[in-house]
Image (tube, helix red, strand yellow):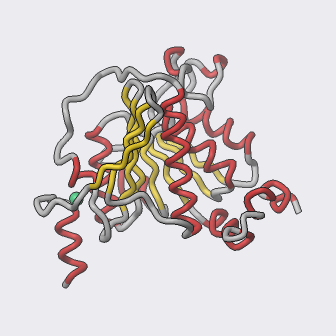
């Protein structure tokens, strides 16, 4: 069977097996932003066999994206990223469903974009949008894998609503943002891969999600540091839902 052959090397992982592969096939993941982080994460989610991937991005590919946004080619310059990404992901794995949505995520469309997904992967480039996604994921109880990059540094944190601190516990309001984020190509590759791996772990219920701490990757020393994060009692978002859970 074609799928058994495609996923042979991961089905051979004893604790994953056919059951884990079927969980991946049945899963529905939203990747918000398909640039350096989200593009890489989406490629690995597709390769691994996540059955449904919704990709959301309003951007059009520019030449200055190609130092890091590896799903794309020069011929895609000027095209909608979600369109080019959907083509690339389908050429990688035609056994899965890709749903490209050429929109920017906003408070108006977020409910529709999060509809029927099991998990959200952060491929965004600004904290306004990340906090919007965080807040809605916590409200709806959808796991959210946050990733961010700057220069030679990358960060990752997983949020399991009702159980772990959320992104707003760490970043209460959007910090001053940069219009253009300087970044070396491989760093979003590293973090995007780790986000995909986190998603696969959560879907297959293997290992332990990277929660209650933030991972800081220093590309200049190749060191990964974990910094513990506690739930903020002042967090306006998850406090509300934790309280509800405790009742
Ligand atoms: Zn919180």
Location of residue 174 with respect to 136 vertically, above or below: above
Q: Kindly give the residue lying farthest to the top in the view shown.
A: 63
Q: Residue at x 20, y 39 (%)?
A: 174
Q: Quadrant of the C terminus?
A: bottom left
Can residue 162 be seen in the rendering of this structure? yes
Q: Quadrant of the N terminus?
A: bottom right
**Horizontally, is 189 left or right of 75 in the view?**
left
Q: Kindly give the residue lying farthest to the right in the view shown.
A: 1
Location of residue 161 with respect to 182 vertically, above or below: below
| Residue 180 drawn at (x, y percent) | 34, 20
| Quadrant in the rendering for residue 179 | top left
| Quadrant in the rendering for residue 74 | top right
| Residue 116 drawn at (x, y percent) | 48, 64
| Residue 126 drawn at (x, y percent) | 31, 35
Q: Nearer the viewer, residue 133 or 17?
A: 17
| Residue 101 drawn at (x, y percent) | 51, 43
Q: Residue at x 55, y 65 (%)?
A: 203
């Amino acid at each position: 069977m074609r799928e058994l052959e495609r996923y042979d090397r991961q089905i051979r992982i004893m604790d994953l097996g056919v059951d884990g592969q079927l969980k991946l096939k049945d899963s529905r993941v939203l990747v918000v932003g398909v640039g350096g982080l989200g593009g890489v994460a989406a490629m690995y989610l597709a390769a691994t066999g996540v059955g449904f991937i919704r990709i959301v991005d309003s951007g059009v590919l520019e030449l200055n994206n190609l130092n890091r946004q590896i799903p794309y080619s020069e011929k895609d310059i000027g095209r909608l990223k979600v369109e080019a990404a959907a083509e690339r992901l389908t050429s990688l794995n035609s056994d899965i469903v890709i749903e490209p949505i050429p929109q920017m995520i906003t408070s108006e469309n977020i409910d529709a974009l999060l509809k029927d997904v099991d998990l959200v992967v952060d491929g965004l480039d600004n904290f306004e949008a990340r906090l919007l996604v965080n807040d809605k994921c916590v409200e709806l109880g959808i796991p959210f894998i946050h990733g961010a990059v700057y220069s030679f540094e990358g960060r990752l944190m997983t949020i399991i609503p009702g159980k772990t601190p959320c992104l707003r516990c760490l970043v209460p309001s959007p910090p001053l943002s940069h219009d253009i984020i300087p970044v070396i190509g491989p760093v979003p590759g590293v973090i995007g891969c780790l986000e995909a791996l986190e998603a696969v772990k959560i879907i297959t219920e293997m290992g332990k999600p990277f929660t209650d701490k933030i991972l800081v990757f220093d590309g200049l020393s190749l060191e990964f540091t974990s910094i513990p994060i506690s739930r903020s009692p002042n967090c306006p978002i998850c406090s509300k839902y934790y309280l509800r859970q405790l009742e």
